[in-house]
């Protein structure tokens, strides 16, 4: 069964508001239009000072907050997801949107997904095969100890090219243990949109899921959406505590 359609930008805005970040907290939700309606990107070379280049894969208002000054063109990665509120703001400001495979985005594309499955109740073979079919570089491991699993993944995500996935029935304990490690920003989520919103809000690098709570397709969908954002940076507001 298809998962419900949810306004990702609204979820991101709510998460940011709860955390007390960003000027958009409390701002009204604007319904997305039927068509894009954004001006086409010019083919002339960019002019210094009027172009903003971002490398995140899900572009939200919080990502762009305070960076709009004098911007006439927004350049995003070729496969970036632009939230409806950002599209509305681009139209309001008459800013051109350009998708580009920049050198920076090409460097950011390849990454590893380190997976640790805790216990023997779930066989990750089919999931690993499905993820590999999506061209995600998967490196699976198993562990019989939740503490050992979080220790391993903390070491893995310390690498600049690695995301982590912890598969365990004990998600609450796993989240607490993982987030005790410096530099680990672990999240979980009940559905793909809220999971992506949480990942963008804290720059998550580790996903914790209960593999027995979902079928193969919903589980794969959540993981794929998490990986779509690539290796995220820790937001500036949290860097001192979470970075």
Image: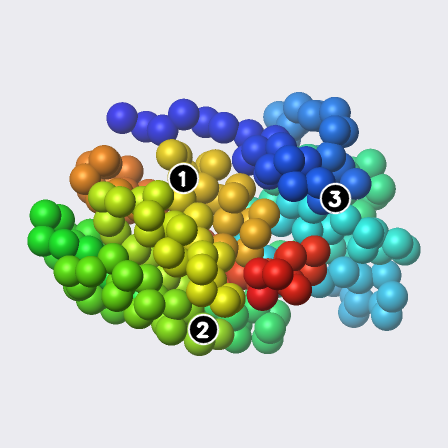
Tell me the crowding category of disc 2: few under 14, some 14 to 19, or many 20 or more residues within 10 angstroms, Cα based: some
- The residue that label 1 is drawn on is 189
- The residue located at (48%, 74%) in the rendering is 160
On residue 158, the disc is 2
Locate the N terminus and report the quarter of the image it occupies. top left
3D distance between C-alphas at marks 2 and 3: 27 Å
Residues at discs 2 and 3 in contact (Cβ within 8 Å): no
Marked residue nearer the N-terminal end (2 or 3)? 3
Locate the C terminus and report the quarter of the image it occupies. bottom right
- The residue that label 3 is drawn on is 22
Marked residue nearer the N-terminal end (3 or 1)? 3
- The residue located at (66%, 24%) in the rendering is 31
Tell me the crowding category of disc 3: few under 14, some 14 to 19, or many 20 or more residues within 10 angstroms, Cα based: some
Taking depth in this image into account, of 154 and 67 the one nearest to the observer is 154
Tell me the crowding category of disc 1: few under 14, some 14 to 19, or many 20 or more residues within 10 angstroms, Cα based: some
| Mark 1 element type | loop
| Mark 3 element type | loop
- The residue located at (84%, 55%) in the rendering is 71
Instruction: Give the image quarter of residue 233.
Output: bottom right
3D distance between C-alphas at marks 2 and 1: 22 Å
- The residue located at (26%, 45%) in the rendering is 170
Instruction: Give the image quarter of residue 179.
Output: bottom left
Q: Position of residue 107 (x, y in %)?
A: 52, 75
Taking depth in this image into account, of 82 and 123 the one nearest to the observer is 123
On residue 68, the disc is none
Q: Position of residue 39 (x, y in %)?
A: 75, 44
Q: Is residue 5 in sight in this rendering?
A: yes
Marked residue nearer the N-terminal end (2 or 1)? 2
3D distance between C-alphas at marks 3 and 1: 22 Å
């Amino acid at each position: 069964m298809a998962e419900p359609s949810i306004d990702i930008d609204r979820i991101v805005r709510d998460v940011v508001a709860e955390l007390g970040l960003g000027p958009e907290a409390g701002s009204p939700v604007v319904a997305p239009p039927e068509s894009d309606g954004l001006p086409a990107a010019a083919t002339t070379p960019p002019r210094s000072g009027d172009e903003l280049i971002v490398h995140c894969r899900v572009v939200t208002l919080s990502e762009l907050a305070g960076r709009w000054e004098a911007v006439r063109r927004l350049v995003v990665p070729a496969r970036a997801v632009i939230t409806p509120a950002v599209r509305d703001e681009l139209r309001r400001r008459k800013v051109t949107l350009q998708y580009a495979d920049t050198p920076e985005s090409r460097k950011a594309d390849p990454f590893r997904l380190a997976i640790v499955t805790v216990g023997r109740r779930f066989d990750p073979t089919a999931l690993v095969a499905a993820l590999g079919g999506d061209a995600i570089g998967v490196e699976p491991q198993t562990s019989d100890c939740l503490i050992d699993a979080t220790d391993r993944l903390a070491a893995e995500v310390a690498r600049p090219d690695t995301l982590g996935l912890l598969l365990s029935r004990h998600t609450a304990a796993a989240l607490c243990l993982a987030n005790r490690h410096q530099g680990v920003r672990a999240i979980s989520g009940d559905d793909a949109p809220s999971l992506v919103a949480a990942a963008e809000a804290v720059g998550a690098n580790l996903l914790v899921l209960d593999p027995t709570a979902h079928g193969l397709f919903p589980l794969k969908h959540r993981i794929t959406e998490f990986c779509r954002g690539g290796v995220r940076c820790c937001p500036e507001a949290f860097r001192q505590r979470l970075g």
